Image (cartoon, helix red, strand yellow):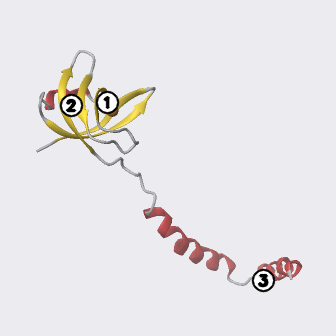
């Protein structure tokens, strides 16, 4: 059976059948689902409570809830990707944030003031 497939394909191609068109349709139908599925899996936001702001070192101490990376709730220091965020938070304020390990340091990469 298998040996028959190649000769048949060659025959179709040579005969000038609309192979390119067929291939294109195949592509677009095939391309749609994967495009939407694994889109930039934006890290979900976690809850945090600002304990201490350290503008000099661009760091903030947060009491945070469980993180998507598996870290349990705790109080710890985060670097901040954008130092301007430190001006938009206050000690004692609830925030929403996402953090990533960047060069071995947990770094806040997204920040939204909580309500
Ligand atoms: Cu932690």
Residue at the spot 27% in from the left edge and 21% down from the top edge: 58
Residue occupying the far top of the picture? 56
Foreground of the two, 99 or 31: 99
Q: Which residue is mark 1?
A: 81
Image quarter where the C terminus lies is: top left
Residue 85 is tagged as 2
Residue at mark 3 to residue at mark 1: CA–CA distance:
57 Å
Residue 83 location (% of width, % of height): 24, 26
Helix, strand or loop at disc 2?
helix
Left or right of 105 in this view: 6 = right
When the figure is inspected, residue 32 is found, relative to residue 75, above or below; the finding is below
Q: Is mark 3 in CB contact (under 8 Å) with mark 1?
A: no
- Whether pointer 1 and pointer 2 mark residues with C-beta atoms closer than 8 Å, the reply is yes
Image region (quadrant) for ligand 1: top left
Residue at (48% x, 69% y) in the render: 32
Q: Nearer the viewer, mark 3 or mark 1?
A: 1
Q: Tell me where residue 1 sits by quadrant.
A: bottom right
Q: Residue at x 37, y 45 (%)?
A: 68
Mark found first going from the N terminus, 2 or 3: 3
Q: Are marks 2 and 3 in contact (CB under 8 Å)?
A: no
Q: Which residue is mark 3?
A: 12
């Amino acid at each position: 059976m298998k040996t028959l497939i190649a000769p048949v394909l060659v025959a179709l191609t040579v005969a000038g059948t609309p192979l390119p068109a067929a291939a294109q349709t195949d592509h677009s139908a095939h391309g749609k689902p994967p495009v939407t599925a694994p889109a930039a899996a934006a890290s979900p936001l976690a809850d945090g409570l600002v304990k201490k702001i350290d503008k000099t070192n661009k760091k903030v101490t947060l009491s945070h809830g469980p993180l998507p990376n598996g870290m349990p709730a705790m109080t710890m220091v985060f670097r901040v990707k954008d130092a301007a965020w430190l001006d938009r938070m206050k000690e004692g304020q609830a925030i929403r944030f996402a953090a990533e390990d960047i060069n071995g340091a947990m770094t806040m990469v997204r920040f939204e003031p909580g309500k």
